[in-house]
Image (cartoon, rainbow, N blue to C red):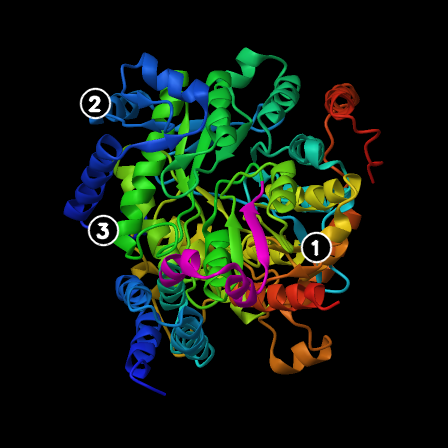
């Protein structure tokens, strides 16, 4: 049998990749990066690097970057809350997670954006848990009904309660890491067990151009020491906070990510790192950051190729849209992004559910996107050889009235070779009209309701729930927060 | 009009072209020639920036042109400003604005756009930069006797600091002294209303319009 070809797209020639890397290394060595965090600068200092503490500037020699690359694992294996599932992040493996850290939810009833509260975060986590093609969850929504100071730990708390999937998260304050780590350790039953089987990924965003804030550098250091993967999210805006050309933006992106990777390796050699990002083709009229622009997706695919060239796991914010309602734009931007990201072999694709420039999550869009992800996985499976010969034997004794519906061969393969449509409309016109002329948004809204009614929350055992609650309450108390919202 | 007309036209052209060097050189020429500086601003530079606004509105200019022209305007005003007498300067200024990006955020692209557009449009701008502490906004506004405080935030997390500035103004009994304008990628009109801000600029030009309205309202007794 001929094995199927893994469909793949690359945008850059090898010479182009090498040129970007070489300019990025030159940039790090020549101009360097700004590092606000004193502990991170001390790490560079200890490594014998020239550090200008007054200017908070570090010039990173190529040798140090190369050493850091050599000690960074090429693959990471995440596991779920029960510690059972294994998800390889590396090679050309593809995993989707809902785009993280939206502040607003597209209200299911009104289809208008509003601030998210606990009930929304829980709903989204439960839906994510039920989406078979979305392997990871993320702390996708920020809950506005808890004090802002504990917004980071609270969203992780809800995620760990309501979904068993590995989780993409991040801190909003340097002190946020400790309670978040404590929760993860509680789930895993120990710090060493967590290190061996990481459950969470911590996003850390450098500030373009070439700056690591105190908070983000601290997140890199803390995650590295805990053995949790840091996902480097460079987010340059072409022509605004980065060079306007795609090639120029790639140089900055690569330099920013490599500097973050070095910080991780200096904090702890062998720390897992994901070469990711959320760059955008800056809109020169609106001043906005379109995630659905083709140029944005091209930068994503290209830096991921560079990450792969460097032997690193990769990530991108793709498969999301700038539309404000689940309309045609919402679908085409998400669909194109998800397909292209998967064809680029990006390991962690953050996007499903997300709209309006990463500001909003929609439960309905999440379910539509789950179907898109399913189609993407089908594409990645490629065209297999199922039989030897492929078909010659099926035509033995062919007659004018030969059909295939009743052939055993059809029954053997149709469910494997073809995916059933879920939310996509494949009705005849009359059937569609008879069913009430529903849009995909309408059908997704119905599916949200039935899913939430049918599936009971995937909660951990009572003892763990209690332990997580205790950590969360202690964090809230120590930050002067009176109480936490009731859980639905 | 007299022999200064071509000079005024060249001043306007320098602004429209976004040529900071020429804009500043022409300002020095006006200074050395002891010309009426207020007239140079009113009949030279301001028509230039007004034209830039029109080109933006008509879809011909985009952000790079807009901001480059704003920078040219700033360069010319930097030359002329110190030479203007206090009354003339006060007459030209549309108001004083303290602007910065909230603590925890070292992204300042949006703030820089707004800051440039405000200066180019005749506001006296005190730019505190990025990662500005809550009380620093208020202290600077008190010290400089500002009319407006403009708060920028790019991150959903630091956006929350905008509310804290307004709360802090109340705690310090200063809420009525300053108008507060908020902006930034995650900020919405609803958010501005919720935290009790006086205005919300969805983009740099909207911020200028809002600031102008708020400053004018404040200065009208």
Q: For the residues marked 3 and 1, what is the alpha-carbon distance in whole angstroms? A: 42 Å
Write down the region rendered in magenta. Answer: B76-102
In-front residue for pair A314/A9: A314
Q: Which residue is mark 2?
A: A63
Q: Residues within 10 Å of mark 2 (few under 14, many from 20)?
A: few
Q: For the residues marked 3 and 2, what is the alpha-carbon distance in whole angstroms? A: 25 Å
Q: Which residue is mark 3?
A: A12
**In which quadrant of the rendered view does residue A251 lie?**
top left
Tag 2 secondary structure: helix
Horizontal arrangement in the rendering, residue B169 relative to residue B132 (left or right): right
- Label 2 lies in what chain? A
Tag 3 secondary structure: loop
Q: How many marks?
A: 3
Judge whether residue A289 can be spotted in this image: no
| Residue under the image location 71 percent in, 68 percent down | B220
| Residue under the image location 39 percent in, 21 percent down | A41
**In which quadrant of the rendered view does residue B5 lie?**
bottom left
Q: Residue furthest left?
A: A15
Is residue B153 shown above or below A33? below
**Residue A23 location (% of width, % of height):** 20, 41
């Amino acid at each position: 049998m001929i094995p199927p070809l893994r469909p793949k797209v690359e945008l850059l020639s090898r010479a182009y990749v090498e040129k970007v890397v070489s300019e990025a290394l030159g940039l790090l060595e020549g101009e360097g990066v700004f590092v606000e965090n004193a502990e991170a600068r001390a790490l560079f200092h200890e490594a014998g690097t020239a550090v200008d503490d007054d200017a908070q500037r570090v010039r990173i020699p190529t040798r140090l970057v190369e050493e850091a690359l050599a000690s960074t694992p090429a693959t990471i294996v995440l596991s779920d809350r029960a510690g059972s599932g294994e998800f390889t992040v590396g090679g050309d493996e593809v995993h989707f997670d809902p785009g993280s850290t939206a502040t607003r939810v597209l209200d299911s009833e009104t289809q208008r954006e509003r601030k998210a509260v606990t009930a929304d975060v829980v709903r989204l986590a439960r839906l994510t848990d039920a989406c078979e093609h979305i392997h990871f969850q993320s702390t996708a929504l920020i809950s506005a009904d808890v004090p802002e100071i504990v917004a980071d730990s609270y969203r992780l708390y809800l995620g760990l309660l309501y979904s068993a999937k590995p989780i993409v998260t991040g801190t909003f304050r340097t002190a946020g890491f400790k309670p978040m780590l404590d929760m993860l350790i509680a789930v895993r039953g120990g710090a060493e067990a967590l290190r061996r089987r990481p459950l969470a990924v911590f996003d850390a965003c450098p500030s373009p151009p070439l700056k690591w804030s105190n908070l983000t550098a601290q997140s890199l250091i803390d995650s590295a020491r805990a053995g949790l993967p840091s996902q480097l999210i460079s987010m340059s805006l072409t022509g605004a906070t980065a060079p306007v050309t795609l090639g120029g933006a790639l140089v900055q992106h690569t330099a920013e990510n490599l500097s973050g990777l070095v910080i991780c390796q200096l904090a702890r050699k062998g720390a897992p790192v994901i070469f990711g990002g959320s760059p955008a083709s800056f809109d020169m009229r609106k001043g906005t950051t379109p995630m659905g622009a083709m140029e944005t997706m091209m930068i994503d695919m290209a830096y991921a190729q560079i990450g792969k060239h460097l032997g690193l796991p990769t990530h991108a914010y793709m498969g999301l849209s700038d539309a404000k309602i689940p309309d045609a734009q919402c679908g085409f931007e998400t669909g194109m992004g998800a397909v292209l990201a998967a064809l680029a072999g990006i390991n962690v694709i953050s996007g499903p559910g997300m709209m309006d420039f990463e500001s909003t999550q929609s439960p309905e869009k999440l379910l539509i996107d789950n179907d898109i992800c399913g189609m993407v996985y089908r594409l990645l499976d490629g065209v297999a050889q199922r039989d030897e010969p492929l078909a010659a034997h099926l035509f033995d004794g062919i007659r004018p009235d030969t059909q295939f519906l009743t052939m055993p061969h059809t029954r053997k393969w149709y469910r494997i070779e073809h995916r059933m449509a879920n939310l996509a409309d494949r009705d005849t016109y009359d059937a569609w009209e008879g069913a009430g002329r529903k849009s995909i948004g309408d059908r997704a809204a119905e599916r949200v309701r039935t899913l939430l009614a049918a599936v009971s929350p995937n909660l951990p055992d009572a003892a763990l729930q209690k332990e997580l609650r205790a950590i969360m309450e202690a964090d809230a108390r120590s930050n002067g927060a009176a109480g936490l919202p009731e859980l639905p | 009009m007299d022999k200064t007309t071509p000079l005024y036209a060249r001043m306007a052209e320098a602004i429209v072209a976004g040529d900071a060097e020429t804009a500043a050189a022409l300002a020095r020429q006006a200074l050395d020639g002891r010309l009426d500086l207020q007239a140079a601003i009113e009949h030279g530079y301001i028509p230039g920036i007004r034209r830039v606004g029109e080109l933006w509105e008509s879809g011909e200019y985009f952000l790079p042109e807009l901001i480059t022209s704003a920078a040219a305007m700033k360069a010319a005003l930097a030359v002329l400003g110190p030479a203007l007498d206090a009354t003339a300067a006060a007459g030209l200024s549309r108001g004083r604005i303290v602007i910065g990006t909230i603590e925890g955020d070292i992204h300042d692209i949006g703030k820089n756009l707004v800051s440039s557009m405000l200066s180019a449009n005749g506001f006296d701008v005190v730019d505190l930069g990025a990662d500005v502490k809550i009380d620093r906004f208020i202290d600077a506004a008190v010290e400089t006797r500002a009319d407006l405080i403009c708060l920028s935030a790019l991150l959903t997390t630091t956006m929350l600091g905008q509310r804290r500035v307004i709360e802090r103004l109340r705690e310090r009994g200063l809420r009525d002294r300053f108008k507060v304008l908020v902006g930034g990628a995650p900020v919405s009109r609803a958010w501005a209303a919720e935290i009790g801000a006086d205005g919300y600029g969805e983009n740099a030009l909207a911020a200028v319009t809002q600031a102008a309205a708020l400053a004018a309202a404040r200065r009208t007794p």
